[in-house]
Amino acid sequence: MLGKIIGGLVGAKLSKSSRNVNEPGGMVMGAMAVAAARRFGIPGMIAAAAGGYALKRYQERKQVRPRGSRPL
C-alpha cells in the first residue's frame, strides 16, 4: 500500500514536466507501475517499455511516409 502511494506521488511530480499527462493521470500511472512491477518483475517491465517504444516508433514512421510510397 505504501509503495502505491509513493509511486502515485512520484507519478504526479513527473507529470508536471509532461505536456500529455495531467497530475491525476500521472498519479494513477505511478501507482499502476508499482503494482505491475510487483506482478511482472523488472524484466517484464523492461520488456513492456521496449514494446511500447517500438510501437510508438512504428506508428511515427507510418504517419511520416507519404501515401503510396514504398518503404526502403
Image (tube, rainbow, N blue to C red):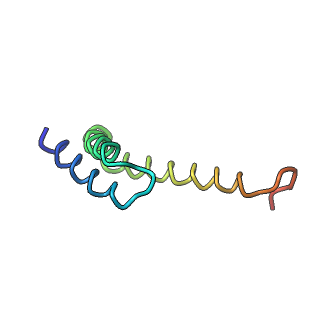
Q: Quadrant of residue 31?
A: top left
Q: Position of residue 22 (x, y in %)?
A: 36, 48
Number of disc labels: 0
Q: Residue shown at 38%/45% (left/top)?
A: 44
Q: Residue shown at 28%/45% (left/top)?
A: 27
Q: Residue shown at 27%/51% (left/top)?
A: 12
Q: Is residue 17 left or right of residue 55?
A: left
Does residue 4 sit above or below 66 in this rendering?
Answer: above
Is 43 or 70 nearer to us in this picture?
70
Rendered-image quadrant of the C terminus: bottom right
Is 27 or 47 nearer to us in this picture?
27
Q: Position of residue 37 (x, y in %)?
A: 29, 44
Is 59 or 21 nearer to us in this picture?
21
Q: Residue shown at 33%/44% (left/top)?
A: 29
Q: Is residue 38 left or right of residue 72?
A: left
Q: Quadrant of residue 64?
A: bottom right
Q: Position of residue 55 (x, y in %)?
A: 57, 49
Rendered-image quadrant of the N terminus: top left
